[in-house]
Each structure stands twice: as structure tokens, then as C-alpha cells.
Image: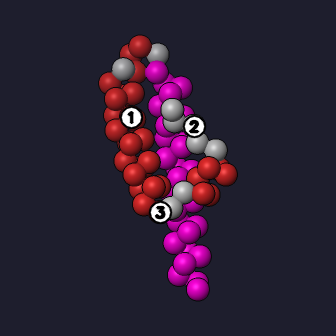
Amino acid sequence: MAVIKSKDIAKMTEAEMNEKIQELKIELIKARVTVKKGGKAKIREIKKTIAKLLTFKNKLSKLGAKK
């Protein structure tokens, strides 16, 4: 389950985002082990989801710094 929609990410707290990022990183490691079985698409999907979470997290921190 690597796909998370943007609206779901927007509802998450920073702690939930950190937890989800850690879960996805572990899932990415597991997917890299099984890449020989044709899991390249799954790896790409996990990386994109991690990037999306980090982007939202950075937006939140920048908004918090401006206030």
C-alpha cells in the first residue's frame, strides 16, 4: 500500500507523516530485495509516495516558520 492521495496526506499530522515515511522506507528496502521478481514498478511507486510525503511535510514546516 504505497499510494496515498494528496488529500489524505493533507489531513495527517507531522507525527503521522514521519511514521508513514519510516514505514515506506522499510517497505522500499523489502521491495529492493525482491526486485528480481519484477518489482521495479513498486519501487518507483514507493519512492514517489515518500517524495510526496516529504513535500507536504516541508510545506507545513515553511508555513509554520512564516507565522
Front-lying residue, 38 or 16 = 16
Find numbered disc 1 in the image and state the secondary structure of the residue it sits on: helix
* Residue farthest along the bottom direction in this orientation: 67
As for residue 66 lying within the magenta part, the answer is: yes
Crowd tier of the residue under label 2, counting other residues whose Cα lies within 10 Å: few below 14, some 14–19, many 20 or above:
few
Label whose residue precedes the other's in the sequence (1 or 3): 3
The kind of residue tagged 1 is Glu
User: Crowdedness of circle 1 by 10 Å Cα count: few (<14), some, many (20+)?
Assistant: some
- Magenta residues span 39-67
The amino acid type, in three-letter code, at marker 2 is Val
On the image, numbered disc 1 is attached to which residue?
Answer: 27
Q: Are marks 1 and 2 in contact (CB under 8 Å)?
A: no
Q: Which corner quadrant holds the C terminus?
A: bottom right
Please name the residue that numbered disc 3 is placed on: 14
Does residue 12 lie above or below 20 as drawn? below
Q: Position of residue 14 (x, y in %)?
A: 47, 63
Residue 64, compared with residue 12, is above or below; it is below
**Among the two numbered marks 1 and 2 on one chain, the one whose residue lies closer to the N terminus:** 2
Per the image, the residue denoted by label 2 is: 3
Identity of the residue drawn at 47% across and 31% down = 43
Mark count:
3
Q: Answer yes or no: is residue 13 visible.
A: yes
